[in-house]
Image: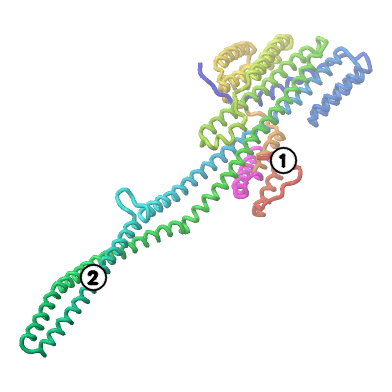
Amino acid sequence: MRQRTHKCLYSLLFAIFAGGLVFCIGCTDNPESQAAKQVREETSAALEKAVNDKQYKSAQDKVMAALVRNRTAGLTHDASVVASGNLALSYGTTEQIQLDALAQPVRGGVDTLAGLIRRNEELMIEKERIQNLLASDDRERTDLQKILKEGTDREPSLEAVRTEAQTEIEKLTGEKDRIKQQLDQVNATRADYQARADELLRQAELAQGEQKLTLQQQGYDILKQQKQYEIQAQEAASGISSLDSQIALLESRLTNLDESFSQVQSRIDAIENSQARQMLTEQAGQIESMQALGRQEMTKTAALISERFKTWNEAADRTLAIFEEAKGEFEKVQAGGAAFAAVLGLAQTSHQAALVCAAQMKLRAELNDRLVDLLQSAEPSLSEVVQNALPIGPVDEALKQRTMDLFGKAFENYQQVYEMASAMGAETQCSVLKSHMLAVSQKMQLADRIGDFDLANQTEVALNELMKKGTELGASFTQSEAVRVIQNEGLNYAPDLPLNLEVLAEGLNQKFSDWKRLPLSEQEQAIDANLAQIDDLIVKHGQKLAQYLEPLKQDMLAAKERGFKEIQAPAGGEPNSL
């Protein structure tokens, strides 16, 4: 059999339940004492006050006080007890209606957390982009520093090449200086020999005969000896010239190396001191600060989700306690005359309590599904920030069992009331059967939601049996809204019923006040959306709803006029606001 998803049919059930209250209120007895009369009068007055002022608990206390004060018994006692039970049931139902509005901050907290996670993911992406840009600069700077000072496996650094050239120039210059010293010594020796030879030849010019020849020969011999020094001088001069050429080439290369060195160093300095790099570094620091704040907000929001979920569960538990109190009142009925109203009250009490437990299960399942999906899709480091603080976990088996037990008790009581109603006519039976049928459909809806499809299929069989039984009651059943929900529109149909504007307005007050909790930069957009929704709601529901929404509307318009300046939060405000 197919898996199904259904909308909540609670509003239709409440409309049917409201009609069921009259079963007890219409009960009367033949008073035999002033006490019984006094109890009836005070009960009637309390019921009227409950209807007019919605003060169910106060009315219930007055009924029970009247019983204690007058100590009546019999049908009068039971009628008042049933009235007290119905007041508790009405009170619980009123509180039950508020649970959905109380759940909105929990769901809104998940929306807020999702937004914070997405924002922090965007910051991480932006930070990574900036870091990649800085890393690109760092890689270029590192490569340039290797070219400048460290070198690579294939090529030495510019600094090493420059040092090698300088060393070679120094070596060649030293060699040139050594040869030059040798040349100077050779030239000095040549000059000495030349002077000696010139002196001998000068003396020979003054001498005669053999002496002249001897002096000339001595002068020529000295000039011959000088010849070897001339060769040495030429070799030295040639060596110096060669060295000068080599030194000039090396000095030219060194000049080019110095220029390359300066260019590379200038590029390194430009990278380190560039304004763009400084801006990127500042942006990276700002993003880190924003990430730290974002993580704090995520942690705070996760804690608030858990706190609000706990608050919601506590409100649901208080509502269940009210229904338990109503059940206790109905179980006090002693006389058979009020038995029908008492059993009907027990059926409705168990039914409503089951719906509250079902709401607890659904919200738990919804939160678990949304939060698990959110954390699985989020960046792992962000998930770790909030995972332990969130209300993640499966539906408690004890709660599931309690819910099914309450549905079972409601079905049992509805069947008992249906049999008792056989003496009261088809219309009464039809009303009871429709309530029973809706309770079964709600159980089936819950089974679908928690994924227990075997239970859903079993419940569907029971629902079909009730439908079959209802067809025997005629048009009052077959043409009813409940049957239309099941047969004509399907289980996804939500019937149009008279709207409780007070309840709606209370929920809208929460929704249309959330803009105050947003950052100033987001408030105008939120207000514009709220104002558009308010206009649509007024068109749809009329001016009566407009009376509730007008103060909210004026508050938002005033915020727009003052330009969304920071407003000092009033003392005693909500400390856990998201």
Location of residue 189 (image quadrant): bottom left
In the image: residue 141, left or right of residue 56: left
Could you say whether the residue bearing mark 2 is in a helix, strand or loop? Answer: helix
Which residue is at the far front?
210
- Badge 1: residue crowd in 10 Å (few <14, some 14–19, many ≥20): few
Q: Is residue 153 left or right of residue 420?
A: left
How busy is the neighbourhood of tag 2: few (under 14 within 10 Å), some, or many (20 plus)?
A: some
Residue 101 x/y as whole percent = 67, 33
Q: Badge 1 is on which residue?
A: 574
Q: Is residue 84 above or below residue 420?
A: below
- In the rendered structure, find residue 182 and report the number of the disc placed on it: 2
Q: Is residue 320 above or below residue 340?
A: below
Quarter-of-image position of residue 297: top right
Q: Which residues are magenta?
A: 515-542
* Picture residue at 62% right of the left edge, 27% below the top: 363
Question: In the picture shown, does residue 564 fall above or below 33?
Answer: below
What amino acid type is highlighted by mark number 1? Glu
